[in-house]
Image: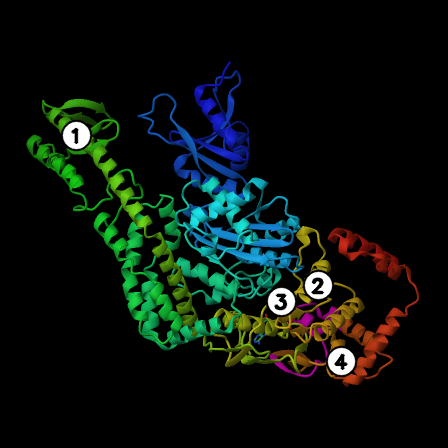
Amino acid sequence: MALSPMMQQYTKIKEDYQDCILFFRLGDFYEMFFEDAKTASRELELTLTGKNCGLEERAPMCGVPFHSADTYIARLVEKGYKVAICEQTEDPSQAKGIVKREVIRIITPGTVISQNMLKETENNYIASFFSRHGRTGLAYCDVSTGEIYATEISRGEDADSFETLLNELVKIKAREILFNEDCTLDTEEVKRITEAYFNPLSADYYEERAVQDAVLRQFKVKALLGLGLEEESAALFALGAMLLYLHETQKNSLEHITWLHLYEMGTHMALDKATIKNLELTETLFEKKVQGSLLGVLDKTSTAMGGRRLKQWIREPLNNADEIQERLDAVEVLVDDLLLRNNLRENLKQIYDFERLSGRIACGSANGKDLIALRNSCFVLPEIKGDLEETDSALLKRLGREVRDLKEVYQLIDTAIVEDPPFTVKEGGLIKEGYSEELDDLKFSIRDAQNWIAQLENSERERTGIKNLKVGFNKVFGYFLEITKSYYDMIPDNYVRKQTLTNCERFITPELKEMENLVLNAEVKINQMEYELFTAVREEIQQHIREIQTTSAAVSALDVLACFAQVAQQNNYVKPQIDCGDEIQIEKGRHPVIEQTIRDGIFVSNDVWLDRKDCSMLLITGPNMAGKSTYMRQTALIVLMAQAGCFVPAETARIGIADRIFTRIGASDNLAQGQSTFFVEMSELAYILNASTEKSLIILDEIGRGTSTYDGLSIAWAAAEYLCNTKKQVRTLFATHYHEMTALEGKMKGVHNLNVDVAEENGNVVFLHKIVEGSASRSYGIHVARLAGVPELLLEQAEVKLKELEEGITAPDPNFSGTAPSKKAEAEALEEQQISFFGFAPNPVVERLRALDLMTLTPSEAFRILEELKAAAEE
Ligand code: ADP
Ligand code: MG
C-alpha cells in the first residue's frame, strides 16, 4: 500500500522541518499528523483522531481551526516547541490535483509577531552570541518592531567578558538565544541565568561568506564598513548567523529590519540580574508585579512604544555625563512648560503602536484597521514637530526633527481606505469611493440592482399587503422573501417556494434571482479588486518603513521624557546635578516607591553623603524594621534614576556618575534550583567583589546572615576591608546586624557609622526612620517580635535569656552590653570574642559543622543534618 498523494506531500514537507511541529493547512483547519499529532494533542489537550492515509493503519491526527490557531501556537511556543506553518499557496478552486503547499513561517519563542502572542509593553528579543578564541560578539533583534542591535563584547581573552555577556542577555530579557554550538563558554550557565529558549547553531551558519552576504543584503549596503562593522569581528558573526536564522524562519518578511544599531559596551550602566531584581526596577521581587516597582511609579507614558522605551531606559541608565545632562535638560523644559508638555502628551495619546505595525506591514499582515490607526497617528505628527521647534532643549529639538510628518503615508491612507474597515482584507469594504475609478464603476454598475433589492421589502409589503414580509439573505439560498404562517393565504403567484421553516416559508422570484446573480458576481470581482488595491497601498507604505521607524524611535523617546516630566511634577522630584566626580550627596532623599505606598504616616526623608576620600563606606546599624534597607535602596534608586535622565525624589541631589550599581539585598534564595541561600549569597558577594570598579556603587545588606554568627561576622568584616583597601574605597552602603562592625570606623579609612534613630516610650519602641550619625546601641529584636504579635510569655523568657547571654558573652568587657560602648572597647571586645571562639576545645558538634561543605548541600540535606546536630547537642 502507498501513502495517499496528500500524505506524500505532507511527509515530503515534514522532512525539511523535523525539529518543528508542522501545522498543515487543510481547508479551515491546521492539521497535525503522526508524532506531531501525539505531541500536540498531549500539550494542547486536543482529541487525537486518525486519518486515512493510504496505509493500513490510520495516521494519528489532531487539528485546530485556523482562526483560533494563534492561541494554540502561542501555547506550544511557550512550552519551547518550534511551530512551522504550512499554508496552501494556490487557490484550491484553481488547483489541478493536490493544492500546492509551502511552509511560510516558523514560529519560535524569539520570533513571534502575532499581536496576541506579544506583551504590548515588552520587547520580544531574539539574541545571538558568537564566541571563539576569546572573542565574543552579541546581536539581538525584536522581529515585531524591527529593532536590531549588535556589539562586540570582547576582542580577546578577558575574564569579565562572560559576565558582560550574561548581563547584556539578562538586561534585554532575550526569549530565545542562538549561539555557535562549538563555543567554549559555559552555555549551561547562560541557560540557567537567562531561562531563555536555547538554540545552538551548526557551523553552516557561521561560514564567512554567507554571514557577510546576509548582513550586506539585509541592510542593503555594499561594504561592512558602511555599517561600522569590522570584518571577522565576533559581532559580525553573531549578527549574520541570526539573520540567516531569521530568514529561514521568517521567510521573506524582514523588510522592516533596516537599521543596525551598533553600540559600544560601556556606554550604559551594566546592571546584573540580582540588582535588577533586588531593586525591583520593573517588577516586584516576590509577586512579579509592575505595581510596587520603580516602573510602576514612573510609567506615565502615553504610547505602547514609550512604555517599552521607558523599561529600556530604566534597565540601562547612561553613564555618559553629556547624554544624561541632555535628557535632564529636556525633562526640565517639559516640567517648566506645562502647555508644551500637555500638548505633547495629548498628541502622543493619539499615536498607535506603529513600531510594531511596521513589522506587520513588512510581512504583509497589516489589515485595514491597522492602516487607519497609522493614519490617525500620522495626523498628530506635524503638530508634535511644530511644537518642538522652538524649545530650549537640544534633545527635544533633535527628536522633533527626527519625527517625520509622514504626509505621503497620511494622504495615501486617507484617500484609499474607508474610515471603519473590517478586520478581514479579502471580503471588501476597505477602499474609499473616489480612489479607483474602475472599482467605483464596478460598484456603480450594480447600484441599481442593490437599490432594487433594498427597496424590495417595502415595495412587496405594499403590493401584497403582507405587513411583516421580510427580505433576507443567507449563504446557501442567497436572497429570499420570508412570509410567516398567518399570511400563507396571501402568497402571490409569482413566488417560488424555496424553504419551509417552523413558522414561516421562504420564497424567491425569478426577478430577484436575476438581480442577485448580478450583485453576487460583481461582488466577487469587487472584493478581489479591493484586496488588490489594498495590498498595493500596503506595499506603497512599505517604501516608507524606514521613515516610520525613525519616527517611532523619536516618538518613544519623547514619550519617556514627557513621562519623566509628568512624574517629576506629580511626585515632587528635583533635577539632580550630574558630574564625573566621586561624590554622592543627597539632601532629604526619599524612596520613590515606598513614599507612594506608605499607608500610615509620612515618609521620613534622609540625607546621604558619600565620597571616595573620607566617607566611602556608610556602615549602617540599627534595629530590624528601622529602615536600613529602605535607605540603601533609595540611594541606589536615586542614582539610577538620575542616570536614566529622570528627576529624583529629594530636595537636592548631586550625583558623581556610577559605572555600575551592585546590590546584595535580603535573603533572596534560589531554593528551587537546589542551591542554599548562603551559597547564593556568597556567589553574589564574590561577583560584586570581582566585577566592581572604582566608579561603582555597592549596596550590601546583611552580608553573612546565612551562616553562623562568627562565620558571618568574619565574612562581613573581611568584605568591608576588601572594599576599602583592595577595591580602593569604592562607594559602598553596608547595612549589618553585626553590631561589632561599627568598630571599623576610625580603624579603616573611609568607614563612617550611621544608625537609625529609635525612640523608647514607656518601654515601647518607636521607629523614627531617621538616619543619624554613630552606631546603634541595641538591636531591639525582642521589641520587633512584640510588634509582630509574638506571645508575651515567650517575650519575657527571651528577655531573661538575652540578659544571661549578654552577661555571659561579654564578661571580659563590661562595656560591651547596654548603652553605646566606646569604639575602642568595642573593637577589643570583638577581638576577644573571636579569639575565644576559635580557641574552643574540640567538640563533636563543632567538628561535624566544620566538616560540612555548605556549597554542595541541598536544603533538605541541610535540614536533616541540622536535626542530627540538634539531637547530638542535646545529649
Ligand atoms: P530594615 O532594613 O532596617 O529592617 P526596612 O528598610 O526594611 O528596615 O524598613 C521597614 C519598614 O519601615 C518599611 O517597609 C517601611 O514601611 C518603613 N520605613 C522604612 N524607612 C522609612 C522612612 N524613611 N519613612 C517611613 N517609613 C519607613
Ligand atoms: Mg533590611
CB within 8 Å, label 2 to label 1: no
Residue type indicated by callout 4: Ala
* Residue at numbered disc 3: 662
Which badge, 1 or 3, comes first in the chain's sequence?
1
What separation in Å lies between label 3 and label 2 (alpha carbons)? 11 Å
Ligand 1 lies in quarter:
bottom right
For residue 382, above or below residue 746: above
Q: Nearer the viewer, residue 316 or 861?
A: 316
Residue type indicated by callout 2: Ala
Q: Closer to the camera: disc 4 or disc 1?
A: 4
Q: Which residues are magenta?
A: 769-796
Q: How is the image coloured?
A: rainbow
Name the side, left or right, on which 640 lies relative to 99. right
Q: Closer to the camera: disc 4 or disc 3?
A: 3
Residue type indicated by callout 3: Phe
CB within 8 Å, label 2 to label 4: no
Residue 287: tell me if it is visible: no
Name the side, left or right, on which 454 lies relative to 355. left
* Residue found at x 48% / y 43%: 74
- Classify 10 Å Cα crowding around label 4: few (below 14), some (14-19), many (20 and above): many
Residue 743: which numbered mark, if any?
A: 4
The single residue placed furthest to the bottom in the displayed view is: 822
Secondary element at tag 2: helix
* Residue at numbered disc 2: 686
Residue 766 position, x and y percent, is 63, 79
Residue type indicated by callout 1: Glu
